Amino acid sequence: MRPPPGPCGRTSRLGARPRARLGHGRGHGRGVAELGRNGDDARMRPEVQTFVAAGPLPDGNASVAEIARRTDQLHAISGPVTAEEAQALVACFGPDDCYGVAWTLLHLIETGPNPVLTAQPAPDANEWHHQLYDRSIAGL
C-alpha cells in the first residue's frame, strides 16, 4: 500500500514528506538579527543539535521507521549551515549512503562555508569524508 501523497502530490519511497529545498544564499531563511558577526550563528540551532545528538546515520539494514526519523530530522535543518554546524554534521555520516540520506547530508554541509575538511582524510576514513573533501577541492 502506498502512503498518501504529500503537499506537493509526491511521496518518497519511505513515505516521508517531500524534501525541503535548501537555501543557497547566506542568511536564507533567517532574519539578519539571528545572524552572528560574520553571517554565522553564534551557536548551533536546536534542529542541528538534535540531529547531531542522534549520532551517525544508520546503515541500510536499519528499520524504515529509523531511517524515516533521521530523514525527518535532517529535513528540519534549513541551509545554509554555519561553519560550526557543518563541522558537527560531518561526524554524522554512517557506513553507507542510507538510501540516499547521506547525499542529502552532504549537500546540506556544502551550503556552509567551504572547505569543511581542510586536510585530506586518512585512507581508512569514512567514504563520505573523502567525497566531501574531493568535492571541495574540485569546486563542486
Image: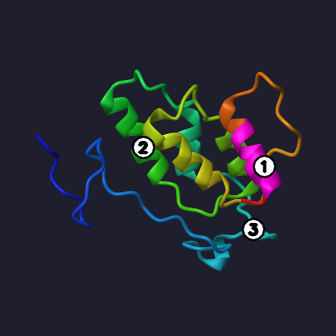
Disc number for residue 36: 3
Does 103 appear above or below 108?
above
- C-alpha gap between disc 2 and disc 1: 22 Å
- Name the residue rendered at 70%, 42% in the picture: 131
Pointer 2 local density, CA inside 10 Å: few below 14, some 14–19, many at least 20 = many
Q: Position of residue 72 (x, y in %)?
A: 40, 46
Mark 1 lies on a secondary structure that is loop
Residue closest to the far right: 119
- Name the residue rendered at 65%, 58% in the picture: 81
Amino acid type at circle 1 is Val
Question: Are the two marked residues, 3 and 2, in contact with CB atoms closer than 8 angstroms?
Answer: no
| Residue closer to the observer: 75 or 45 | 75
Earlier-in-chain disc, 2 versus 1? 2
Q: Is residue 28 left or right of residue 13?
A: right
Q: Position of residue 125 (x, y in %)?
A: 75, 26
Question: Are the two marked residues, 2 and 1, in contact with CB atoms closer than 8 angstroms?
Answer: no
Mark 3 lies on a secondary structure that is loop
Q: Position of residue 1 (x, y in %)?
A: 10, 40
Residue closest to the far bottom: 32
Amino acid type at circle 2 is Thr
Mark 2 lies on a secondary structure that is helix
Q: Which span is picked out in magenta?
A: 130-138
Residue to which mark 1 is pinned: 116
Q: Position of residue 55 (x, y in %)?
A: 57, 30
Question: Are the two marked residues, 3 and 1, in contact with CB atoms closer than 8 angstroms?
Answer: no
Residue closest to the far left: 1
Disc number for residue 71: 2
- Name the residue rendered at 25%, 45% in the picture: 15
Pointer 3 local density, CA inside 10 Å: few below 14, some 14–19, many at least 20 = few
